[in-house]
Image (spheres, rainbow, N blue to C red):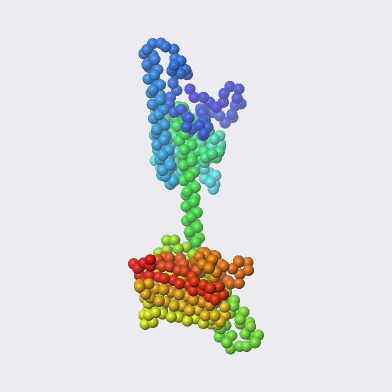
Amino acid sequence: MLRYLDGPGQESDPDRHDDDLIPQPDPSEVDDLDFGPAVDGDEPLDAVRVGDQDDQTDMLKQKIVGLEHRIGYLERIVKVSQMLNSTLSLEPLLQIIVQSATELTNTEACSIMLIDRNTGELRFAEASGGVSSALRKISIPMDKSIAGYVIRKNKPILIRDAKNDPRWHGDVDTTLDFQTQSILGVPLRVRDRVIGVLEVINKTTSEGFNEDDIQITTTLGLQAAIAIENARLLDELQQAYRDLSQVDQLKNDFVSIASHELRTPLAVILGYATFLKDNVKGEASEQLDIVLSSAIKLRALIDDMVNLRHIQTDGVQLERSIFSLKSLVNDVTKEFSQIIATKKLILTTKFSPEDSLLNIDGDRQKVYLIVANLVSNAIKFTPEGGRIHVSVHFNDHKYTLSVIDTGIGIPKAEYDRIFDQFYQVEPPLTRKYQGMGLGLSIAKGMVQVHRGRIWVESVVGKGSKFVVVLPSAPDVRDE
């Protein structure tokens, strides 16, 4: 017979009922659980008294049957464990647990109830035949239900006559039009925390639930709890990624709208400020210098906002078209013309062959980012009165774009690092030049998605030359 938790000399548990059977195994001893029926006789085989040969043969056969029975259960538990470990999707996982529990215990039905992490309520997560919308609405009370008792006591419970038990919650039978007779419930425990309850209902064999059923259900509950927790954590992680993706999209949309809306009024400010500076003298001219300087800084900030949208190049898809690289370079220089005039820079261009449109097959927006960031970088680091030269040369199915400036130059040791995101040569607390250090990183990323190359040549104090090589078409590789 099964043993009760309370034995002679122990204090009585006021919540204990006569049908509560609690042969609770330690989680660390799950592998040592005995899944076979008890065999009469506690003595080892070699200590059995030598008697009738037939009795001894029957005893051996009985032990062999018990071992085979135990091995069979172990094999089924191992298969179930493999199935549980083969999926991290919560819904299929719960279905596997319910089906396996009913098969292993020869019961009519099974249900899984999990504690809602937000509300603390105990609700059905899966059941034999699926969980209907009506069943999902049922909240199982913690204080007046068999499942709640399992969670509060953190131990298995066996009820042979459920309807006569005061803890029986009959709403479920009413909802499902089902007749519950006996219940075996075990806690779903992850370390020292109970996350729910696994219940098998109505043993289909005449002898009813036995110790094997308790051990099997407890073992399955321990395995299932870990698998369920892992699946829930994965679901939460995936949802967090989805939420992050939505936030990132909102950020990109905001940056796109904000930068577009700011460019137009800023262009007007730069234009009028430049015009006025050429026509006023004295103190007014000094005030206009402040306005122009602030406008240029604001323009650099807007450029950084645009660059933030393109900071990641993984999985970038090119929207290819055939366009004039010569026309694109002219558009870029026109865009920066007011800033160039404000800083009194001289910008020149050269195209070879001169009479060609220099058509290229690529993503115009992304190539525009390459040229714009290189020109912006040259403007930023070239002092007032300096020179910038942009050239495009076509040869051997490749375009070579060069942006040369007479700026501050770059130390040779920094050649590779200047293309890193957010990297700046100047110390962050004492730097003279504004910006987030994204322009060159974006340019390099856009060059790479076009299967091109980019590098820098520079002399400190004299200037820099950035060179980009792009194939003229997607099937032309620059080896």
Hey, which residue is sitting farthest right in the picture? 283
- Residue drawn where x is 48% and y is 37% of the image: 222
- Residue drawn where x is 38% and y is 70% of the image: 471
Q: Position of residue 400 (x, y in %)?
A: 41, 73
Which of the pair 373/234 is nearer the observer?
373
Q: Position of residue 367 (x, y in %)?
A: 43, 71
Q: How many labels sit on residues?
A: 0
Which of the pair 235/110 is nearer the observer?
235
Hey, which residue is sitting farthest top in the picture? 51
- Residue drawn where x is 54% and y is 37% of the image: 151
Q: Vertical placement of 166 versus 55: above or below?
A: below
Q: Quadrant of the C terminus?
A: bottom left
- Residue drawn where x is 38% and y is 67% of the image: 478
Which of the pair 456/231 is nearer the observer?
456
Which of the pair 301/394 is nearer the observer?
394
Q: Vertical placement of 471 versus 326: above or below?
A: above
Residue 422 in the figure: left or right of residue 324: right
Q: Position of residue 269 (x, y in %)?
A: 55, 80
Hey, which residue is sitting farthest left in the picture? 475
Res 325 seen here = yes
Q: Quadrant of residue 153?
A: top right
Res 257 seen here = no
